[in-house]
Amino acid sequence: MEQKETSIIDLPSPDLLWINKADRLAWRLNKLEPGDNIALNIQNKDWIEPIDMVLLALCTLIIHEKTQNQVVIKGLLPHVERYLATMGFHDLVKDACSNLQLRQPMFNFFTTNKSVSITKLNALEDILPFVNNVKSVLDRAFPNRRMQNYKDKVSTVVLEACSNGVEHSTRPTYGVVQVYSHKGENEVRIAIGDTGMGIKRHLQNRHGNIGFSDNQYIMKALEGTSGRLGARGGNGLRRIQEICRENGGSFSIRSGQGALAILPELFEHQGFNEFPGTQLSIVLHPNP
């Protein structure tokens, strides 16, 4: 059998709603066939955000599963690759990726004060340790006791988002949390992503057709419509938009063909190609 040439897929920056190249990325992923040789191009990015890392892990997993070949990751600058090693990214994708080098991790300053390693969530029992890590990071970043209610709300949202991903996807869910410091103030960024059924199908399973586009279903979820059969949970997206609007944070979500952001004003985009599952990016500030 003749070996196929390697095709390059550019990984877009997920800034805002990943509008510019996300549709093409989804189209390329949906066209993959067994035997395809794929290289993911990081395009020499100077830095990797938590949502970048989640997207990279999800794409690597999807490509490996669909092509049955290992993925090559291109365009990684040495300091970015060291950062990924520090976060433990290499261990998560080593079966799906052929060329990542386990470079010397960065200084302990990152691992002890700034970062929590990316976490693969395969089952419900994997969620609580990640949520506890998020709580620990929030306590270090926002030590003011008056913020305890704020931190508790965020932890509840993370728990629900992770539970939805694990329950509705046959592939792993990934979570990343990290603290950024700027002018003496901390900012916490959290990213959670899965490749499951997405918000539209999740709500349709419970309520039937209550909208047309993915964005309409995302808006329903933001308003508090729950796809859960039980009485508990189902309001995580409503809570997180309230947290961001009240405290000056930001929040973006992609699901299916839809994408919304609270920046804190509402911004939305409806794409043409479906990216599987749901991906969240949350930015939290210390001024509730």
Image (spheres, rainbow, N blue to C red):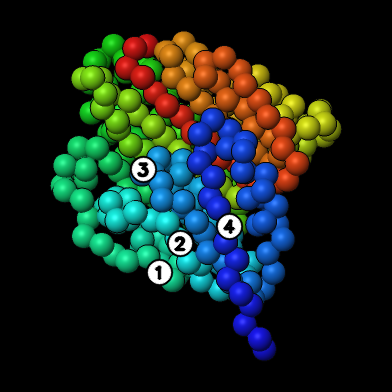
Q: In which quarter of the image is the C terminus?
A: top left
Residue at horizontal 16%, vertical 48%?
107
Q: How far apart are marks 3 and 1 (CA)?
A: 19 Å
Q: What residue type is labelled 4?
A: Ile
Q: Residue 99 carries which label?
A: 1
Which mark's residue is nearer the viewer, 1 or 4? 4
Numbered disc total: 4
Find residue 73 and name its label: 2
Whether residue 123 is visible, yes or no, is no
Which of the two labelled residues, at mark 2 and mark 3, occupies the earlier sequence position?
3
Q: Distance between the residues labelled 1 and 2?
A: 7 Å
Write the residue at 25% across / 62% down. 103
Amino acid at the residue labelled 2: Ile
- Residue 176 versus residue 120 in the image, above or below: above
Q: Residue 47 carries which label?
A: 3
In the image, taking residue 27 as reference, residue 52 lies left or right, namely left
Give coordinates of residue 245: x percent, y percent: 50, 13
What distance separates the C-alpha of mark 3 from that of mark 4? 19 Å
**Residue labelled with disc 4:** 9
Query: Mark 4 and mark 1 in contact (Cβ < 8 Å)?
Result: no
Asked whether 99 or 66 is in front, the reply is: 99
Asked if labels 2 and 1 touch by Cβ distance under 8 angstroms, the answer is: yes
